[in-house]
Image: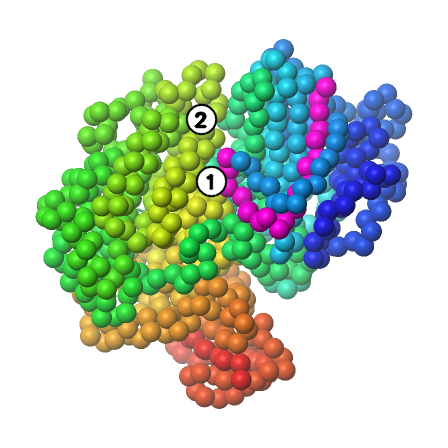
Amino acid sequence: MITFNQKTGIFHLSAQNMSYVMQALPSGHLIHLHWGKKLKNAALDYVIDEIKRASYIADTDGIKEFKLERLPIEYPAYGNSDLRTPAFSLIHEDGSNLSDFRFISYEIVDNLLKPKSLPSLIDEKGETLIITLFDKVKEIEMKQYYGLNSKTAALIRFVTVKNKSNKITKIEALNSACVHFEDTNKELLHFSGAWAREAHRQQNSLTQNSQVIESRRGQSGHEHQPFIALVDSLVTETTGSVHAMSLIYSGDFKASVTTEMHDALRLQIGLNDYQLSWNLLPNEEFEAPAAMLVYAENGLREMSQEFKTTYQNFLVRGKYKWQKRPILINSWEAFYFNLEEERLLKFAEESVNLGVELFVLDDGWFAKRDNATSSLGDWNTNYKKFPNGLGSFSQKIKALGLQFGLWVEPEMINPDSQLYQEHPDWVLGDCSRNLSLSREQYVLDLTNPEVRDYLVKTFIDIFNESAVDYVKWDFNRSLTEVGSDYLDASQQGEVFHRYILGLYDIVERITAAFPDVLFENCAGGGGRFDCGMTYYMPQTWTSDDTDAIERLLIQEGTSYLYPSASMGCHVSASPNHQNGRLTSLKTRGVVAMQGNFGYELDILKLSKEEKCEIKNQIALYKEIRQTVQFGELFNLSTAQKDNAKAWLYRSQDSNEVVVSYVQILSKANTPSKRLRLSGLQATADYLLVDTGEIRSGDELMAIGLAIDEVKEDFYSQMWRLKKC
Ligand code: DGJ
């Protein structure tokens, strides 16, 4: 619910367990009063009067002791007496970079609004508060959007800036959300890593400085999730408060927390400003990406559940939103570029026998692509590998009873390609420089509408020709020497953001043309695992690292933010191709069953026993799939702190429970261990499906299940429980 008190100027946005409160002062400054526990009335107009004065700070508007730098400003500007880190920066045509936005009006609408050209939540039953601010000297209008959805306590924020003058203003920074905290007794939580070790949970203390989480790679990146949170230092799964922000965007972002000299914090998230310089022409409007703010009173599980429930209900779209995802087999780690139709058909046939539902033809099927050096851009079938064309191959796969999936990397071009011969000017980058190749490829300039139209037509034709049921959309390099020959000199500071707008344009058009096709997002694994791409594609290949043990941390971090159904997890070969580790097929299966399950190894090389085990794994996953993909996740122990990782899925109706446990290293002379469960009904009895025993919920949560004593690294166990 959103209310406004005319007398005090107080706005109160409230959802279950959460209040967000602001005040428009008589001076027109918008002040932040509270984001956290739900308040009954939020009559907080006394707070400003109770703020103590501080020395060496300027007065505002000529009013003695009216010091902006002491106030919790909602969306701080540069150009007044508040010298702390601003939330935005505009440079006007006269060279001035001062701004002064004051409250003009507000509006509350019955719909959850989103930026028009960018992804965000969709919920007609939600509501939005729009606060209009105006800089009367420069005639610039700014609107602050605050949206509530109808189901969770997540808050959507974004900002638009409109130029109402007849001069050009440049946007040099524009955060989507900024929140002031008086309580500095907090720590920073974020998820970081690199290629093949994404989304590791990190927590560190704050001190009087700024800490930045960002991407400068042109993609949200393997390095940091577009996410930042402040947590109580002793936060656990179930205790401690969390204030989290995530950006619904796939390009360069910046999230920061600044501890200022008077012991307050500013938490911000938005577009990365380091290369941003956007020309806002007269009458034009610029919109910042949407940020999602989640407050949780009871630890990380509550935060995680808020994010995931919100994404699953309002961000994920289309036919597959609630549809069980198929069990797939992917050709990549089985054959890499060495694709041969005959062998692939045998591989597919064998996978049908094992219960696989979807066959995915990965990289290497087109032009003369035998390795990474050529052919990206030439999306015609390689007839040496598929003598009768891709359409015919797809039909043969379907005739076996499998769905057909295809890998593509539309945004890329190899210099060794026909497309490059014809359109060298379509490459993104400042061509007066020596452009860097990465994986032997350049990026196409998606700021150019001609390139975008070409890609949309090309891929619509390919997907029609091969009658795809599934598409894996890959992206395998970062942007370097960024510039665009298509844009003019004054627009070079717009390239990063325009690239992402171009990307969203093509994925919207292509996915809309194939409402029945399941799209999987991928960027060398989790390099663009973000909410922006999740809006267009309901699932993502979590990481190029398929080792079960490394996946424990990767999947743990990822699953704090994203629904299980969005997280691709495959069983691959042992020794693992990324790190050489040997793990049992059982453990690889247990770990891959944490998300969207599949296989990525040459099953033709497996023994009869191994195939039999895979058949059993697939049969088991089919039984637990609904619970895993759409149930609620409970982390029971974390691979980061413990020498083991355990998690539990509870079905939506709470009747089914799947518990998984992976020991990491075996240790001598340890006492016997038990695994205490969470999320059960204390008063209910549960059947342990494998043994037929009955245990009560309170005992399972207080005493737990016995863990096998084994002398074996990477040992795993799985239990299924049904409520009696
Ligand atoms: C990177 C992906 O993450 C892999 O799964 C595979 O599709 C390769 N690209 C293919 O080039």
What label does residue 250 carry, if any? 1
Q: Nearer the viewer, residue 163 or 174?
A: 163
410 or 574: nearer the viewer: 410
Please state the horizontal and vertical placement of residue 1, each as a whole percent of the image: 72, 50
> What amino acid type should be assigned to the residue bearing mark 1?
Ser
**What element does badge 1 sit on?**
loop
Mark 2 residue type: Val
Whole-percent x, y for residue 329 in the image: 28, 60
Q: Which residue is drawn at 16% across and 51% down?
A: 392
Point out the tag, 1 or 2, that comes first from the N-terminus: 1
Tell me if residue 548 is in the magenta stretch.
Answer: no
In this picture, residue 407 sits left or right of residue 24: left
Residue drawn at the location 10% of the way across and 45% of the way down: 384
- Residue 218: give x, y in percent of width and height: 43, 34
Give the residues drawn in magenta, as a range.
Answer: 117-136
User: Mark 1 vs ligand 1: CB under 8 Å?
Assistant: no
Q: In which quarter of the image is residue 136?
A: top right
Compared with 646, 58 (above or below) is: above
Residue 216 as seen in the image, left or right of residue 57? left
Disc ID at residue 380:
none
Above/below status of 621 relative to 96: below
Q: Which mark is residue 495?
A: 2
Query: Is the residue marked by circle 2 packed among few (<14), some (14-19), or many (20+) residues within 10 Å?
Result: many
For residue 508, above or below residue 703: above
